[in-house]
Structures are given as C-alpha cells and as structure tokens.
Amino acid sequence: MSHFTNKVAVVTGAGSGIGRALSLDLATKGARLALSDVDTAGLAETVRQCRLLGADVRSDHLDVAERAAMMTYADEVVAHFGSVNLVFNNAGIAYSGDVEVAEFKDIERVMDIDFWGVVNGTKAFLPHLIASGDGHIVNTSSLFGLLAMPSQSAYNAAKFAVRGFTESLRQEMLISKHPVKVTCVHPGGIKTAIARNSTAAAGQDTKALAELFDKRLARTTPEAASRVILRGVQAGRPRVLIGSDARALDALVRLTGSGYQRIVALWPVVCCLGDTSRRDARDHRARTGHRPADQPAAAAQRARHHAV
Ligand SMILES: NC(=O)c1ccc[n+]([C@@H]2O[C@H](COP(=O)([O-])OP(=O)(O)OC[C@H]3O[C@@H](n4cnc5c(N)ncnc54)[C@H](O)[C@@H]3O)[C@@H](O)[C@H]2O)c1
C-alpha cells in the first residue's frame, strides 16, 4: 500500500497506547477510520483528537473477544464506508503469573482477547479486504511472540499463536494471489498503559510490576511504534520488530536457539517478574548462595519427585 489517503482503516483497542497513536497517525495521513475499544472514555478521547485532525471517524464499543459482535461490526463498517482496506488487530491485555499459580480462567481470558480477538478480527474482515482489491491485515503479536519469559506463559501462548496464525495467513494470501498483504507486529517495551492495566496471579505485586515495566522495560513511545508499523505496512513487510530491545532479543533467539531460555532465566530483571516465592528464592540465593530449604514450591516439587 503506497499511501493511506482515503483508505478505510479499522483499529481495535484504539482508546489507548499504540492503538491511539496509530489512529492519530492514520488520521494525519488522510485515512478514514473505524475505531473501537471497550474503554468508552479512552476511545472518545482518541476520536476527538482524530476529528480535530479532520479525519472521518466511526466509533464503536467493541469487545474483540465477542465473535458475533465482531462479525456484525465488520458488516456495519463496510456498509458505512463502502469498503475496508486496513485492519489493525491491536487490542490486547497483559497478565503475569507462573504456571503453578495461574488460574485457568485468567489464562483463558488472555487467550480470548489476545489470540481469539485477532482471529475474530481477521476472519470477520478478510472477505472484505479481499473484495477491496487493496487490503492489508496487521496483527499485533509481541516480542513475547518471539521468545518466552517466566511468568508470561499465557501471554506468550497467545502471542506465539498470533504469530503462527498470521504467518500462515500470509502464505495463503500469496498462494491464492489475493490482494491482501499481511504483517505481524512484534513490539518490544512500549510506553503505554498496558502494564498498569494488567492483572496478575495471586501473590504478585501488580503495582511493582507496572513500575518495573514503566521505568526499566518500556523504551519506545507509542508514537514511534506507530511510525515503525506504518512504514512496515507501506513497505509490505511480513514482520515488523519495534525497538532495539525487540531486535536484540530476536537476535539472541536466532543465535542461541533454545539456549536463550537458560540465559533469560539468569537475567536479574526477569526474576523480578515472577511470583513472590520465586523472587524470595532468588533473594535468598543472592544472600546465602544456597537454594532455600523451606521454599514451599521447591519443597512440594521435591516431595512429588520422591513420591514417584
Ligand atoms: N506496550 C508494550 O510494551 C507492548 C509490547 C508488545 C506488544 N504489545 C501489544 O500491543 C497491543 C496494544 O497494547 P498497548 O501497549 O497499546 O496497551 P494499552 O493498554 O495502552 O492499550 C490497549 C487497548 O486495548 C483495549 N482492550 C483491552 N481489552 C479489549 C477487548 N477485549 N476488546 C477491545 N479492546 C480491548 C484497552 O481498553 C486499551 O485501550 C496489545 O496487543 C499488546 O499486547 C504491547
């Protein structure tokens, strides 16, 4: 896609962060916008700012996990604008929790929004993108769709799934010669509200996690992220990495294969992401050089081991 002027662009999760920055960038570039979010106030603010830039904007309350609503929404957007050219399946949430303590319902919620939300948006809009004759689908995965991290199993699962789903879709579009380009986006740490909005398993200090993310891990502004994404879209890139952190860690995975897992487990910041017992164990190891004998999880694991 050589330009965005008069193109119809759909952005989910447009009420904050990368979704808002994309909406404003697209508005500046003359696109017509279908913006949605579950956060009504955040969405209204994005819409207000886009209209100030002169954009033609349609705004809807839409939960991307609601499949029937997404299907109806796609039809309504096409009826409203006449066609759709770009779909940014951007909405997402974060969640932290070790597998041992994460509850099924929390893992399912992450999958429902971060993976099924992308599938719902892709399936609902794909026929319309094909019909447009000039379509592009942009699915947001993550750096955590390229490498796994302790405490991020649910998020990793969803974002790895988005990557597989999107890369397969791209191959299908190439084989069938449909006029739809496909891009998978892998942001590193972006300065948005994602960590502050995130939930976590019992025993995790969500405030401390958000502070750690905001102060030490989020390096790129959403505006810069949007610029990189739109440049990637214009160039028809299959994969867009955002930030030096994403590029460096992607290189680490390529260079070390599965070896990166051991390296990541030794990285001090990563130990802070986990549940309290894991963090306590690390502090104890740092103080004494020994594994704590009274670590509940470790003790339970040893007991299980002895039982078999
Ligand atoms: N910020 C980062 O460091 C980072 C890194 C990698 C990937 N990402 C991904 O980028 C995307 C955008 O995140 P962000 O950083 O801008 O976060 P954000 O929290 O600032 O914005 C996310 C938006 O999605 C909306 N949302 C949440 N659940 C929704 C649902 N069920 N239906 C519709 N909207 C919903 C929220 O209300 C919010 O407005 C997400 O998919 C996220 O996983 C972010």
Image (cartoon, rainbow, N blue to C red):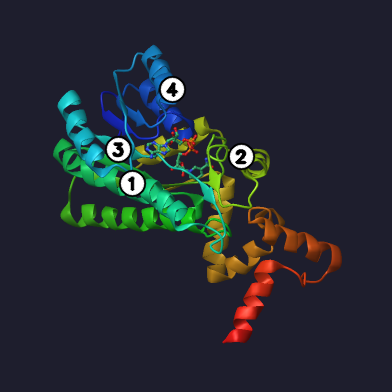
What residue occupies the far right of the structure in this picture?
288
Q: Which residue is mark 2?
A: 219
**Distance between mark 4 and mark 3 Cα atoms:** 22 Å
77 with respect to 39 (left or right): left
Q: Which residue is mark 4?
A: 41
Disc 2 from disc 1: Cα separation: 25 Å
Q: Is residue 25 above or below residue 258?
A: above
Camera-near label (2 vs 1) is 1
x, y percentage for residue 40?
Answer: 40, 25
Q: In which quadrant is the N terminus drawn?
A: top left
* Crowd class of label 3 (few under 14; some 14 to 19; many from 20; radius 10 Å): many
Residue shown at 33%/43% (left/top)?
A: 65
Q: Which residue is denoted by mark 1 in the rendering?
A: 118
Q: Quadrant of residue 191?
A: top right
Neighbourhood count class around disc 2 (C-alpha, 10 Å): few under 14, some 14–19, many 20 upward: some
* N-terminal-most mark, 2 or 1: 1
Which label's residue is closer to the chain start, 4 or 2? 4
Quickly name the residue at label 3: 87
**Observer-nearest of 258 and 4:** 258
Residue drawn at 32 percent across, 33 percent down: 62
Mark pair 1, 4: CA separation: 23 Å
Please tell me whether mark 4 or mark 3 is closer to you in this view: 4
Q: Residue 202, how many percent across, how many down?
A: 59, 52
Q: Is mark 3 within 8 Å of ligand 1?
A: no
The secondary element bearing badge 4 is classed as helix
Amino acid type, callout 1 = Val
Among the two numbered marks 4 and 3 on one chain, the one whose residue lies closer to the N terminus: 4
